[in-house]
Amino acid sequence: MNIYSNQLQSYCSSGLLTQDIVKHFFTYHSDSGWLTRNFTVNHNALKGSRAGKLEKKGYRVIKIFGKAYKEHHIVWLYHYGYLPKHQIDHINRIRDDNRIENIRECSNAENNQNRGISPLNTSGYPGVYWNKRQNQWHARIGVNNKRIHLGYFNTKEDAIKAYDVAKKQHHSFSS
């Protein structure tokens, strides 16, 4: 029995995925962030093909021994030797761009700092909204699951400036 047979047997009994197992079955491509298969599993999973498939939310999912893992978690394990204990943030917000320099482990609050703009947003800028009742631009920011009112402003630019100042103060994680 070789080392991988022992690890596979250990994995099957414990359910713990290791870096060695991942590196045995997949090759990581740093230019694309893709994992490709080192072996043919079946006619849909050929050696050299990109592993996994895209799910509805835009993340790639890879099945390993019948258990589904998000590709970015496997890439993290491939590089750092452990599955992330928290969430993984895609810095550029592209959910299947799993280049190691584009992903980072973070808390839920930190991950929320890198969210896109809501489709309901009226300004095209996060944290800045037109308030019909006040007939002014409203700036606010979320911190520790609370919304902080930054003020009402006559111009969108002033509201954006207020938001930017607060973001630098409260959201140090965001890019």
Image (spheres, rainbow, N blue to C red):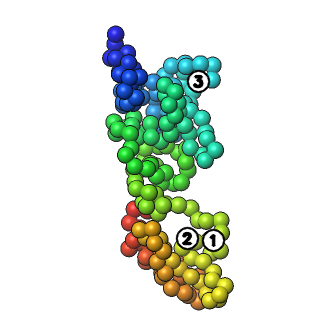
Q: Quadrant of residue 41?
A: top right
Q: Is residue 52 left or right of residue 162?
A: right
Q: CA distance from mark 1 to mark 2?
A: 7 Å
Residue 31 visible at all = no
Residue at 54% x, 73% y is 127
Label 2 element class: loop
Q: Is residue 111 above or below residue 56?
A: below
User: Badges 3 and 2: C-beta atoms under 8 Å apart?
Assistant: no
Q: Is residue 13 above or below residue 161?
A: above
Which badge, 1 or 2, comes first in the chain's sequence? 1
Q: Quadrant of residue 166?
A: bottom left
Q: Is residue 44 above or below residue 109?
A: above
Tag 1 and tag 2, C-beta contact below 8 Å: yes
Residue 97 rendering spot, x and y as whole percentages: 53, 45
Q: CA distance from mark 3 to mark 1?
A: 42 Å
Q: Amino acid at mark 1?
A: Asn
Q: Which residue is mark 3?
A: 45
Mark 2 surroundings within 10 Å by alpha-carbon count, few (fewer than 14), some (14 through 19), many (20 or more): some
Q: Give residue 161's position: percent from left, percent from top.
A: 49, 80
Q: Which residue is mark 1?
A: 121
Q: Quadrant of the C terminus?
A: bottom left
Mark found first going from the N terminus, 3 or 2: 3
**Which amino acid does the dot numbered 2 rest on?**
Pro
Residue 126: give its label: 2
Instruction: Give me the residue at 38% from left, 23% from top.
Output: 13
